[in-house]
Amino acid sequence: MPSKIMPYYVEGLFANQQGVKRKRKTGVLPAGSIEPYARTIWANSPQEAIRMATSDLAGGEWTQSPRVSQTTEEQRMRSMGSPELPGFSTARPKKVK
C-alpha cells in the first residue's frame, strides 16, 4: 500500500553556492552568503522532504539542520493567539444597516 503524500513545511538557513566555495578556500563562511529557506514540499515522509529541500539548494549547504513541520509558522502563531501587525489581519465583513 503506498504511503500518503502530505505537505511538509521545511524552514531553515543555508549558505549559497558562492559561500560554500569561499568557506572551502578560507575556512570561514561569509555572513552575506547565508539565506533563509522556507518552502512547502509534498512528500511521503519528513526525511524525504528534507532530501528534496537539500537537492533544491543547488550547491548550497544547510548551516543547521532544517526544521520540518506540518503547520506553517503563521498557523502556529495564530493558534497561540499572538498579536498581529496592523493591516495583516483578515478582513472582517462590514455590518449592513
Image (cartoon, rainbow, N blue to C red):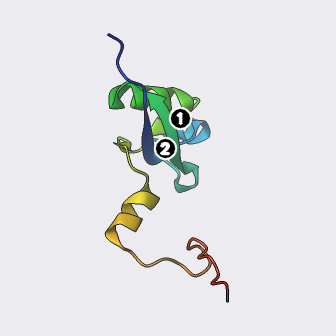
Residue located farthest toward the bottom when viewing the structure as drawn: 97
Residue found at x 55% / y 30%: 56
Q: Secondary structure at mark 1?
A: loop
Give residue 28's position: percent from left, percent from top: 46, 47
**Crowding near the residue tagged with mark 2, few <14, some 14–19, many ≥20 C-alpha atoms within 10 Å:** many
Quadrant, the C terminus: bottom right
Residue 20 left/right relative to 67 = right
Residue 57 left/right relative to 77 = right
Amino acid type of the residue tagged 1 in the rendering: Gly
Mark 1–mark 2 CB contact (< 8 Å): yes
Between residues 38 and 14, which one lies in front from this camera angle?
38
Sequence-wise, the earlier of marks 1 and 2 is: 2
Where 92 sits versus 22, above or below? below
State the mark number for residue 93: none
Give residue 47's position: percent from left, percent from top: 34, 28
Residue found at x 37% / y 43%: 70
| Residue at the spot of label 1 | 60
Write down the quadrant of residue 51 in the picture.
top left
Write down the quadrant of residue 21 in the picture.
top right
Give residue 93's position: percent from left, percent from top: 62, 76
Quadrant, the N terminus: top left
Residue found at x 43% / y 79%: 83
Q: Secondary structure at mark 2?
A: strand
Give residue 10's position: percent from left, percent from top: 44, 42
Where 52 sits versus 2, above or below? below
Residue 29 left/right relative to 3 = right
Residue located farthest toward the top when viewing the structure as drawn: 1
State the mark number for residue 14: 2
Residue found at x 42% / y 26%: 5
